[in-house]
Amino acid sequence: MEWSGWSPIDVEHNMRREDLTAVGEGRAPGLHLGQIVQAMRAAANLPQGTPPGDQEGVRLQEGFLWESAVEYMIAGMTLDAALELAFKRYMLHLRSGIVKQVQLVKDDIHMTPDAFDKEAGALESYKVTRKKLPHTQGVFEDKFWPWLVAEKGYCLAAGVDAVRWYVLFQAGDYSRGPGSGPKAVTSTSVFTLDELVENWKSVTAYAVGMSVEGEK
């Protein structure tokens, strides 16, 4: 696998509220309570803006994602599933016009990758995790292998060899200990045909085992 390594997602200039409208859009003119509270915080010498070392805008966007996630949890979803769905919805909105959602079937196994960029010939995968951001390919492959198994399967079925990852690492890279600033980053993986075929052999072998077990 060729892996590009991580680069930041520009969240700061792509902030979206819970309803996916841009932050500031439709804002009524005049003085707002939030401005007054900010002024009061400054007068009290409380910290202002993004904490040092944090990626600009990510904490604020997390707050808007949380608003969506709460609605999903009220409907019965788990916290992790709700946060991931909220992030997928946000990313699909930002990538609209570039990507589309597709459903794939290979060897009677159904697959639904997050998005497909036909022009680039690449799939896209949107993830949210509290695991530590992996800085090397080796750690990425070791700690996030279930992601790779899934995306290799999607790639083979879609007839492409690349996936672009868009990941919200909620605890960042633990640079300031667990719970440090969140990071929204992207990278690209390009697989060889041998990697895709060998991965699919493992998937189908496991599927056969599941079928046999289910027949007992």
Image (cartoon, helix red, strand yellow):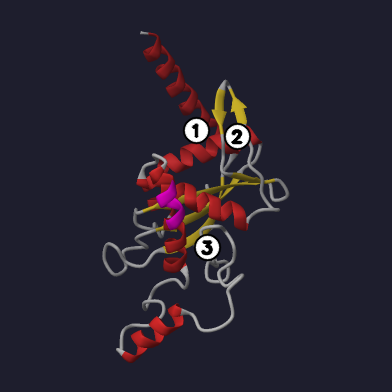
Q: Pointer 2: residues within 10 angstroms few (<14), some, or many (20+)?
A: many
Residue 188 visible, this orientation: no
Q: Residue at x 48, y 51 (%)?
A: 86
Judging by the rendered image, the residue that carries numbered circle 3 is: 17
Q: Residue at x 52, y 29 (%)?
A: 200
Q: Pointer 1: residues within 10 angstroms few (<14), some, or many (20+)?
A: some
CA gap, disc 1 to disc 3?
39 Å
Percent across and percent down for residue 20 are 57, 59
At label 3, the amino acid type is Arg
Q: Are marks 2 and 3 in contact (CB under 8 Å)?
A: no
At label 2, the amino acid type is Leu
Residue 88 visible, this orientation: yes
At label 1, the amino acid type is Asn
Residue 49, located in which quarter of the rendered image?
bottom left
Judging by the rendered image, the residue that carries numbered circle 1 is: 199
Instruction: Choose between 46 and 10: the one closer to the eye.
Output: 46
Q: Pointer 3: residues within 10 angstroms few (<14), some, or many (20+)?
A: some
Instruction: Choose between 94 and 191: the one closer to the eye.
Output: 94
Q: Residue at x 42, y 63 (%)?
A: 63
CA gap, disc 1 to disc 2?
9 Å
Q: What quarter of the picture does the C terminus occupy?
A: top left
Q: Which residues are magenta?
A: 67-71
**Outermost residue toward the top?**
216
Q: Are marks 1 and 2 in contact (CB under 8 Å)?
A: yes
**Outermost residue toward the bottom?**
43
Give the main secondary structure of the magenta stretch. helix
- Look at the image and say whether residue 148 sits in the magenta stretch: no
Judging by the rendered image, the residue that carries numbered circle 2 is: 156
Instruction: Say which label, 1 or 2, has the lower sequence index.
Output: 2
Q: Secondary structure at mark 1?
A: helix
Instruction: Please say if 199 is above or below 83.
Output: above
